[in-house]
Amino acid sequence: MRRYGKHTDEDDIRVRPSRRGTRPRTHTRPKHEDAAEGLVLTIDRGRLTCLVEGRTVTAMKARELGRKGVVVGDRVAVVGDLSGAKDTLARIVRVEERTSVLRRTADDNDPYERVIVANADQLAIVTALADPEPRPRLIDRCLVAAFDAGLEPLLVLTKSDLAPARPLLETYAPLGVRHVVTSREGLAEGAGAESVRELMRGQVTVCVGHSGVGKTTLVNALVPRRQRATGDVNAVTGRGRHTTTSALALPLPPSTTGEDGWVIDTPGVRSFGLNHIQLSRVIHAFPDLEEGAALCPRGCSHNEPGCALDAWVADGHADAARLHSLRRLLGTRERREGD
């Protein structure tokens, strides 16, 4: 039944006042030109720890960012209480343009990519020579991710007191990847950590590796003042136990020359999916082969009959071992990581 007649007048309608007041809504967002610059160091349950003007500040993501993600290594604009005092909270209102992004997927069929860190310069692939055994396919996958993201790869081999490094190094020698070998005793004494630290000076280095390889032990040796919990390898499964649950950026101690740098410790990974990566971009990491690849048929996978790289190598323009390494990396999706 109609409460009012068919022809009503506005004065006859009772309007309930808005609980939110009468201020008109606007889509104009503040520019926050006075925001301070910050660096995201770690994230824990929605709270982000940022370095702002030499102080560590706890912040949360502003609603105006929407679903835009913020990750460790991001350079952000921060407003609010920047004192860093206990129980204070600032807001991240803007994420600055990233220079690099390291991503992975859970597996090669997972369409959802996960950003590990932003703005890194170097990817340190940490691998134990024993306890647990090396997993070359996982190393290959990390190399592909590094080449795709434009990061300089660094192979860090740990626990050399348990097994020799030479066999694994010979596998990756054709790639020309920089490497450093450490032992548990060397890290404990500090000399091993210094050799790694020198390769990280002046750069932001993210450490990646599966659990139990000594990644967090390495980071603790690199930054002695900040110790993270470490774990042992499971004697039954031969796999490491997860002890690091979140990524954490730490400043390296300054050197005598004044050079510094950052190292980012990340949780151990059991898999490194490459579903998000266009493997055709991997060829850019092989400049000696890239010119020959321009002669390949359109859509060539570089691992099929008719690939021009075979003739390119046969004519002496590149080493056959380099082509073998390229094809091994391009074939990572077809192999299981535990192979």
Image (cartoon, helix red, strand yellow):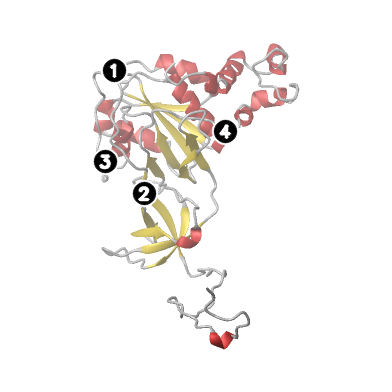
- The residue indicated by pointer 3 is 228
Between disc 2 and disc 3, whose residue precedes? 2
Q: Amino acid at mark 4?
A: Ile
- Closer to the camera: disc 1 or disc 3? 3
102 vs 67: above or below? above
Q: Callout 1 environment at 10 Å: few (<14), some (14 to 19), or many (20+)? A: few
Alpha carbons under labels 3 and 4: distance apart: 32 Å
- From mark 2 to mark 3, how far is it between C-alphas? 13 Å
Q: Earlier in the sequence, mark 2 or mark 1?
A: 2
What numbered label is drawn on residue 89? none
Nearest-to-viewer mark from 2 and 3: 2
Compute the Cα span from label 4 to label 2: 26 Å
Is there CB contact under 8 Å for labels 2 and 1?
Answer: no
Q: Is residue 200 above or below residue 98?
A: above
Please tell me the numbered disc located at residue 42. 2
Q: Secondary structure at mark 3?
A: loop
